[in-house]
Every structure is written in C-alpha cells, then in structure tokens.
Image (cartoon, rainbow, N blue to C red):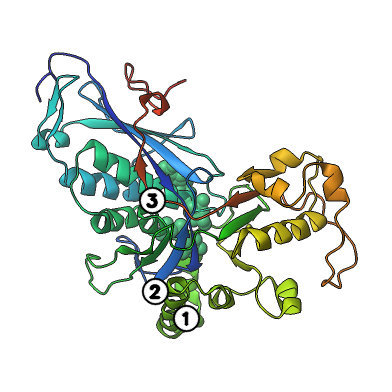
Amino acid sequence: MAAAEEGQWVLMATGRSPTNIAVIKYWGKRDEALILPVNDSISVTLDPDHLSATTTVAVSPSFPSDRMWLNGKEISLSGGRFQSCLREIRKRAQDVEDEKKGIRIKKEDWGKLHVHIASYNNFPTAAGLASSAAGLACFVFTLGKLMNVKEDHGELSSIARQGSGSACRSIYGGFVKWCMGKNNDGSDSIAVQLADEAHWNDLVIIIAVVSSKQKETSSTSGMRDSVETSPLLQYRAQTVVPERVLKMEEAIKSRNFESFARIISLVEKWNQSEGTPRVAYTFDAGPNAVLIAPNRKNATILLQKLLYYFPPQDNDLSSYMVGDKSILSDAGLKSIEDVEALPAPAETKMPSQKFKGDVSYFICSRLGAGPKVVTDESLALIDSVTGLPKGV
Ligand SMILES: Nc1ncnc2c1ncn2[C@@H]1O[C@H](COP(=O)(O)OP(=O)(O)OP(=O)(O)O)[C@@H](O)[C@H]1O
Ligand SMILES: C[C@@](O)(CCOP(=O)(O)OP(=O)(O)O)CC(=O)O
C-alpha cells in the first residue's frame, strides 16, 4: 500500500444508477439469503436524470470502520444484504493505482481497508418507486469501480441481486430480463439486456406519485407472505409467467405496443373506447401508478386527461410535474388556467367530479441507460479531504 503509511489520502469513485420498473414482476423467492426468485422478470430502466441513485465510495487508511450515509443520514451497514455485496465485491478487488495522487493499493490490501459510502436518491426512498433497485445497483457498481473489479455486467448483476432482487436489473439500461436460473448457488440467476434504451425510445413513462410516504409493507415481507400463504403463486411462477415472458420479449423485439400493453393491462376506459390500447399501466408494491404511452402524442393526451381529474392541490403546475417538464407545454398546459379549461374526457361516464390532491405529483420519464461513472469530482458526495459526506 504505497503512500498509505505516508499520508492521510482519500481515494474516491462516484457512480449513478437508474431505477427500473418491472413489466413482468419478480414476486417470491426460492432462497431468501441468496435472493433467488421463483420466476423470471422483465423491466424497463428509467432515465437516470429523473430517477436514480448517486453514490460516492471513498477509501482511506484513516477510516477505522465501514460507514454509510443515505440521503444525508447515517445508516447501518451491518445488514446481511449490504454485507453480502461488500464481501462479494471485495473478493474481486484488483490492484489500483492513482499516479497523480501517488496512491497504490495492492489487491490483498483491500481486505484491511475500510470504506465510507454516501448515497443520494433523486426521488422518494422506500415508497414503491424501486429505490432499493437503484440504490443497491449503484452500491455494487461504484464499489466495483473503486476496487477496479473486472467482472462483466452479468456478474455484477448477480452481486447486486444479493442486495435487493430487483437491483440486478438496474445494472443495464433499456429492457432487461432477470433470468431466475436453476442453480442452488445462484450463479445463473443474473440479468441480461434484451434491448438498449435506443431500441424503442418513443415510449413515454408517466408516474402518478400518489404517496411518497414509507410503505407499511415492504416488497420483501409482502412477497414472503405470498410464498407462505398463496396457493396461486406457484401457478403464476410455473404457468403464467413463462408464457408471458416469451410474449413480452417478442413485443419488445418488434416494438408491438398493443401486445406490450395487453400483457400489463390497460387504462381501461380510454383504451376500450378507442378499440386499441393507447396507454399501458403497471403498479409495483405501492400505490403509485406507472403509465406507459407508446409515443409523445398519446402521452400528451393522457396528461390532459390525468390533469383534468387530478389537478394540483396548490395550483402550482411546475412543481406538480417533475422529470421531463416539457410534456406540459406539449400538452398545451402552460398555466393553471389551461388545466382548468381542460374539457372532460369524452369517453368516461364518470360524473365530472375532480380529485384535487389525490395525486402528490407526476414524474415524466423515458427509457434510460445503465449505471455510469460520474467523472466530475465536484459532484462527489464525499469530501476528498475529510472523507466524510459533504455538509456533515
Ligand atoms: N441509494 C441507496 N443506496 C443504498 N441503499 C438504498 C438506497 N436507496 C434505498 N436503499 C435501501 O433500500 C431500502 C428501501 O427498499 P424498499 O424495497 O423498502 O423500497 P423501494 O425499493 O423504494 O420500493 P419497491 O422495491 O417496493 O419498489 C432502504 O431502506 C435502503 O436500505
Ligand atoms: C413489486 C416489485 O417491485 C418487487 C421488488 O422487490 P425488491 O427487489 O424490492 O425485493 P427484495 O429482493 O426483497 O429486495 C416487482 C419487481 O420489481 O419485479
């Protein structure tokens, strides 16, 4: 460990990883410790500009223990999941040399060195928007960068899987499949990319955030209950999902929105009245609806309908739409007066009742790329001198 004994150096890496939303859900584990699922799943990776985790990992001979901060608050790293990811990455660590800083770390030294990790989510944590997916993928990806891990994305995905199942899919951009695998040691339970984010880049994803409160039931315990109590879960895993995965893969490959939407169901009334699906929807284990439109045109029509029924509580349109705000002007909605002037959607027989305040805000996003290194050091979350999170 050259230079280590000589000075109090801090070496850092920063990464950013997207979140993902499953269109065929992972629900149920056959092995709780290794996080091995009972079925394959398929997801879309969202644009990291809108929904992502940014993580800085620092190493220094002056750190007495591993520590982690999430959204500015120190959290424990002692949980089995964080420990599995740390252990698996450390095992694969290689020699690292930073000539400019005069730092050389030999691969055998990594076992003696401690890390400080600071992470920040640009969207609500633990509210059904898959923060654990972005967070654990980023944790593994960034540790891997700092420790010069040479393993490919498949191997990284299987390490991220041990942090949170859905995290293995956030190692790639675009459309991703998590293959459940057969092996008891989990070696073949990895994610693969079906198509990159450019393959079907017309898709617009609008998320109606109904509640950003912490969920009462986590996905982990919810799926455990299902495995233990639901006689239907096995049928889903063995019969329903395999067939749907094939159809979904075909729909993605051929950009067949009708088939894609049919599989994940419909925004019932509009789609029925049109005779062909205009928008698809899906929910994760929380109240927030994820709506997927095949193109910008349908997304703007959808937004007009959504805002007709769910106008902003405090009349502030700009903070009501986060992510790609330009969808508002595309929908002709520049001010609250434009929202008030929207006509009632013709196809619904609902009374012209409105639900002001029922949606906290909307996020407009699109398909996005996989994890990336953040090279701009000013964006690091850890101070390179103190080795502590900035502002702490
Ligand atoms: N940026 C992050 N870095 C490391 N760990 C994170 C990060 N963000 C979230 N986590 C971990 O994930 C946990 C939240 O996971 P949980 O599954 O309860 O919610 P969620 O992933 O937001 O929702 P869901 O999986 O149902 O969509 C946090 O308590 C924390 O342990
Ligand atoms: C409904 C889901 O979002 C469930 C995600 O569950 P998690 O990956 O959060 O669960 P653990 O593996 O226990 O950490 C469906 C999905 O993403 O496929």
Three-letter code, disc 1: Arg
> Which of the two labelled residues, at mark 2 and mark 3, occupies the earlier sequence position?
2
Residue found at the very far top of the displayed protein: 6
Q: Residue at x 24, y 36 (%)?
A: 146
What amino acid is found at the position of numbered circle 3 in the picture?
Gly
Front in this rendered view, residue 377 or 83: 377
Residue 140 percent across, percent down from the top left = 31, 46
Q: Judging from the image, what secondary structure is the residue with disc 2 in?
A: loop
Name the spot of residue 281 as percent of width and height, x first: 61, 67
55 in relation to 132, above or below:
above
Residue 370: numbered disc: 3
N-term-proximal mark, 3 vs 1: 1
Can residue 221 be seen by looking at this rendering?
no
Q: In the image, which is nearer the foreground, mark 2 or mark 3?
A: 3
The total number of labels drawn is 3
Would you say 116 lies left or right of 317 here?
left
Residue assigned mark 1:
236
Could you say whether the residue bearing mark 1 is in a helix, strand or loop?
helix
* Front residue of 183 and 22: 22
> How far, Cα to Cα, is label 3 from label 1?
29 Å
